Image (cartoon, grey):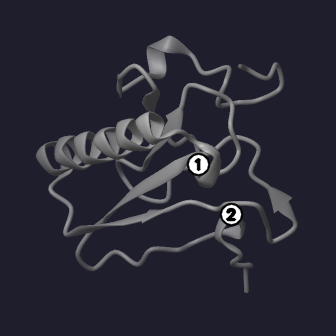
Amino acid sequence: MTETNCQYCNFDEYDVLDKNDFGVILPEPNALSKGHCVIIPLRHVSSFFDITDKERKSLMSLLELARNELQLRHQPSGFHIGFNDGEIFGNVSEHLHIHIIPRYKDQELKLDARWGMTKD
C-alpha cells in the first residue's frame, strides 16, 4: 500500500542505492554526514513493530548491505543507526525509515530536530 503524500512511498527509482523484495536503500536528502542513507520498507507502514517477520529480516539485510557499501566507499570510523517510532518530539513518523549515518574520526555528529535536538 502506498500513500500519495508520503515521500518514502513516492521515491524516484533513480535514487535507489539497492533494494530487495521488501525494501530499498535511499540517500538521505538532509544528510548529517557523507553517505547518510535510509532503509525503508516498500509497504507503507509507520511502526517497526507492525512490519512482518519477512520485512524485518529484509530491512536488516539491507542495513547490513548499506553498512558494507559505506565501508567500501567512505571508510567511516563507525555508524550511528536509529529510527523514531510513534509520536516523537511532536512529529509522527508516517513511514518507517531506518537511518544509517556514517561517523568519521574527528567529525562531530550534530543531530537535529528529527532526533529531538534543538539549535542553541
The x, y position of residue 13, in whole percent, is: 49, 13
Q: Position of residue 79 (x, y in %)?
A: 31, 65
All told, the count of numbered labels is: 2
- The residue labelled by disc 2 is 114
Left or right: residue 9 versus residue 104 is right
Please name the amino acid that badge 1 sits on: Asn
Name the spot of residue 26 as percent of width and height, x first: 46, 33
Quarter of image, res 11: top right
Q: CA distance from mark 1 to mark 2?
A: 10 Å
Q: Residue at x 36, y 42 (%)?
A: 57
Name the side, left or right, on which 7 lies relative to 57.
right
Residue depicted at x 52% and y 43%:
28
Which quarter of the figure is the N terminus placed in? top right
Question: In the displayed image of the protein, which residue is found farthest to the top?
Answer: 13
Q: Is residue 100 left or right of residue 69?
A: right
* Residue position marked by numbered label 1 in the rendering: 30
Residue that sits furthest to the right in the current view: 90
C-beta proximity under 8 Å, tags 1 and 2: yes
In terms of image quadrants, where is residue 37?
A: top left
Q: Quadrant of residue 83?
A: bottom right
Determine whether the residue tagged by mark 1 lies in a helix, strand or loop: loop
Q: Is residue 6 positioned above or below 85 on the image?
A: above
